[in-house]
């Protein structure tokens, strides 16, 4: 049995930005997945990018300066 | 009788097989609405739209694909740029070679307190950039002009105009690339454009109902959207989102069309603009050569030099009206072209072909030298009638 790593998500202004972020993060060979935004984080109908919490700083670094607005939350 | 399609300046035909395949693939295997849910098919549809922006961005040397908004055509893109940025009291400069997609929104704004300078062009339809400089006023808000005329193919010196406008940061430079996107190399940074409207169904080889507008970073704050509505983002708020591209993209998009546009633009990238341009130049040169031999009976408009025009050739045959000529061309030679005014009355005034218009043959990447020869043979045939 594997223990599930804790996850974090990055929230964006729009689906287009989430898709852009997915491309940027995947290009750095970081495992990530687009998922519906969890209800407790936003009532928006969009998607967010999920990745391992251990990579939170790395993801922030990749997105910084490339995407105007994003927020990272721990799940 | 075989048909020879010489109306590519209206819409390109045929399209690459990949364009049709991409549209079928979307409708058979994806089908969902992009950006409206988190399920797999919606995300796939969203990726497809994102890929469309990315391929277009690569073609136009745009760093951030989200600076491109997708529209239904170049007219919508031009209307967003013109109506969105210009307010009563502003002054706008345009040229004497514009399509109605530029002139009509401008004439509408003129009736609402906007002043307009229409800079004349040479009898070949060419603009002198220094005339634009001279037309600048204190309250000039925008210079909007075509990259190449849809009537004569005349390629305008947009890079020189972009340079002239560098000293006026408050003036927006909006280029109508309906005739050139996919046909000529375009680098938005090199031409120093603020806004560029393009259509998807001409030289980008996509389906009708697709187009877009490039908006330089930072400018979207100054440009109001034409249409407001659902975007899939900020759904808890009733105010229109203020960020790109959602601000200008309300309602379910033409996803199937953009699937085709992505494939068309990818085809252009793969072939390369240079190869496409060289092929179209060769055909245009061949046809221009044949018309040149008939210059006692034929009037040619525009530069009459394939290096200085797109693959569009406008001419008149003495003593035959454009519409009669077009009918005979189709009935006797199977040539499909466009006669008349080409939605650009001011351009026809510049060329002195108003109101009868011209016969326009416009070649595309899928035309051949044989098509140019057939076109020449048909014009010679018309003279013998």
Image (spheres, coloured by chain):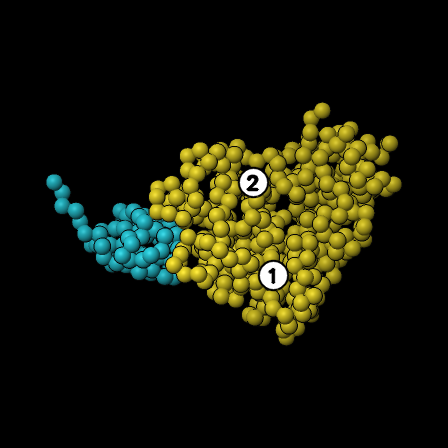
Chain colours: A cyan, B yellow
Residue B62: x and y in percent read: 48, 54
Dot 2: what SS? loop
From the image, tell me which residue sits under label 1.
B82
The N terminus of chain B, quarter of image: top right
Residue contact between numbered discs 2 and 1, judged by CB atoms under 8 Å: no
From the image, tell me which residue sits under label 2.
B207
For the point 55% across and 58% down, which residue is it? B226
User: In front here: B193 or A9?
Assistant: A9
Protein chain holding label 2: B
Among numbered discs 2 and 1, the one appearing first in the sequence = 1
For the point 75% across and 39% down, which residue is it? B289
Q: Are marks 2 and 1 on the same chain?
A: yes
Figure quadrant of residue B136: bottom right
Residue B170: x and y in percent read: 56, 70
Crowd around label 2: few <14 · some 14–19 · many ≥20 (10 Å): many
Q: Is residue B224 left or right of residue B130?
A: left
């Amino acid at each position: 049995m594997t223990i599930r790593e804790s996850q974090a998500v990055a929230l964006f202004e729009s689906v287009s930005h989430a898709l852009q972020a997915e491309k940027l993060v995947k290009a750095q060979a970081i495992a990530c997945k687009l998922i519906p935004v969890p209800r407790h984080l936003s009532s928006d109908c969009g998607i967010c990018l999920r990745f391992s919490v251990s990579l939170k700083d790395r993801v922030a670094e990749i997105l910084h300066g490339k995407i105007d607005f994003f927020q990272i939350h721990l799940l | 009788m075989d048909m020879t399609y010489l109306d590519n300046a209206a819409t390109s035909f045929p399209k690459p097989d990949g364009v049709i395949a991409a549209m079928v693939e979307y409708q058979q295997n994806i089908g969902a609405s992009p950006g409206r849910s988190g399920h797999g098919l919606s995300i796939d549809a969203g990726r497809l739209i994102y890929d469309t922006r990315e391929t277009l961005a690569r073609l136009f040397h745009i760093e951030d694909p989200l600076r491109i908004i997708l529209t239904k055509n170049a007219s919508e893109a031009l209307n967003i740029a013109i109506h969105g940025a210009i307010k009563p009291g502003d002054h706008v400069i345009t040229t004497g070679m514009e399509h109605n997609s530029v002139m009509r929104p401008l004439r509408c704004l003129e009736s609402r307190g906007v002043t307009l300078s229409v800079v004349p062009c040479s009898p070949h339809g060419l603009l002198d950039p220094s005339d634009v400089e001279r037309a600048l006023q204190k309250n000039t808000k925008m210079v909007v002009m075509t990259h190449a005329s849809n009537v004569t193919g005349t390629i305008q010196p947009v890079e020189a105009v972009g340079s002239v406008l560098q000293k006026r940061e408050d003036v927006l430079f909006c280029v109508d690339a309906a005739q050139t996107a996919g046909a000529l190399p375009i680098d938005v940074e090199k031409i120093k454009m603020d806004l560029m409207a393009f259509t998807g169904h001409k030289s980008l080889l996509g389906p009708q109902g697709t187009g877009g507008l490039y908006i330089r970073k930072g400018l979207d704050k100054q440009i109001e959207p034409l249409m407001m509505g659902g975007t899939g983002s900020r759904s808890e708020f009733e105010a229109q989102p203020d960020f790109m591209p959602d601000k200008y993209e309300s309602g379910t998009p033409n996803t199937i069309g953009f699937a085709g546009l992505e494939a068309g633009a990818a085809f252009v990238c793969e072939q390369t603009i240079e190869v496409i341009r060289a092929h179209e130049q060769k055909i245009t040169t061949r046809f221009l050569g044949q018309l040149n031999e008939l210059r006692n009976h034929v009037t040619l408009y525009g530069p009459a030099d394939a290096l200085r025009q797109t693959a569009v050739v406008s001419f008149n045959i003495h003593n035959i009206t454009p519409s009669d000529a077009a009918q005979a061309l189709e009935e006797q030679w199977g040539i499909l072209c466009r006669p008349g005014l080409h939605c650009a009355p001011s351009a026809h005034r510049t060329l002195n072909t108003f109101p009868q218009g011209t016969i326009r043959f416009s070649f595309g990447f899928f035309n051949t030298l044989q098509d140019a020869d057939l076109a020449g043979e048909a014009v010679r045939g018309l003279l013998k009638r």
